[in-house]
Amino acid sequence: MSKLKDKVAIVTGASKGIGAGIAKSLAAEGAAVIVNYASSKAGADKVVAEIEAAGGKAVAVGGDVSKQADAENLVAKAIEHFGRLDVLVNNSGVYEFASIETITEQHYRRMFDINVFGTLLVTQAAVKHLGQGGSIINIGSAVTRITPPESAVYTGTKGAVDAITGVLARELGPRGIRVNAVNPGMVITEGVQAAGFAASEMEQALTSMTPLGRVGQVDDIAPIVTFLASDDARWVTGELILGSGGMR
């Protein structure tokens, strides 16, 4: 527990899946973590309990990242509980596939509001407190490389996250704040299993495209984020790191 000793991190969408894994990984390296959730308080509380059982510090904070008041409250809670903010992981995201013929305004707005506007709102609130050495990590997706059919809106949101990462790296670099993205391939999470993608033809197809010969696990992604949050990555900004086992 040394790389992130005395650091404070926010992880959005951390009640399960990749976000939960990231929160626990950051805490294992010494960070105090705000575990954000949108609806699953029980899931967030479980993550907090696991962190505390391992000797770490964490607090669950609810909030919809696509609402400005919630985004600002999330950051305010980090300052209230831990007195500072050093790391922001914009992990909250939703996905849904639809053919071009079936895309609706609701489909579009839900994903862009959470995946893109949410990233901007929480970052906007966080940069008031991040200082020299601060790190922002956006969770994108390898879909921007493989552009699968029926993902125009979802892939569009993640393409926007890629672009935002580059812009903010330039914009915030003079303030000593680094901005990077981690773009996972398919990762087995509760959501992936619930959607029926695990052990499916999709998983088989993606595995066949992956040089390392399997799909990802949460523990494959969290250490990459922890590296970017730490001073080991002090000379890294504006990067999009594919965490996909070589699939591209």
Image (cartoon, grey):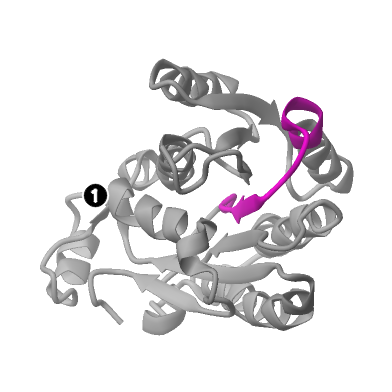
Kind of element beneath mark 1: loop
Nearest the eye: 27 or 6 = 6
Magenta highlight on residue 83: yes
Q: Tell me which residue sits at (18%, 70%) in the image.
A: 205
The residue carrying pointer 1 sits among few (fewer than 14), some (14 to 19) or many (20 or more) residues within 10 Å by Cα, namely: some
Q: Which quarter of the figure has residue 187?
A: bottom left
Q: Compared with residue 67, is residue 57 higher up or lower down, i.e. above or below?
A: above
Residue designated by label 1: 198
Q: Compared with residue 227, is residue 190 higher up or lower down, i.e. above or below?
A: above
Q: Tell me where residue 40 appears, x and y as whole percent.
A: 57, 26
Number of residue marks? 1
Dividing the image into 4 quarters, which one contains the C terminus? bottom left
Q: Compared with residue 161, is residue 50 higher up or lower down, i.e. above or below?
A: above
Q: Tell me which residue sits at (72%, 83%) in the image.
A: 170
Dividing the image into 4 quarters, which one contains the N terminus? top left
Nearest the eye: 117 or 205 = 117
Chain part drawn in magenta:
78-93
Amino acid under disc 1: Ala
Q: Tell me where residue 207 appears, x and y as whole percent.
A: 16, 67
Q: Tell me where residue 169 appears, x and y as whole percent.
A: 67, 78
* 91 left or right of 227 in image: right
Q: Tell me which residue sits at (45%, 38%) in the image.
A: 20
- Answer whether residue 196 is visible to the viewer in this image: no
Q: Which quarter of the figure has residue 245?
A: bottom left
Q: Tell me where residue 146 appears, x and y as whole percent.
A: 36, 81
Q: Compared with residue 164, is residue 138 higher up or lower down, i.e. above or below?
A: above
Magenta highlight on residue 138: no
- Answer whether residue 123 is visible to the viewer in this image: yes
Nearest the eye: 145 or 104 = 145
Q: Which quarter of the figure has residue 185?
A: bottom left
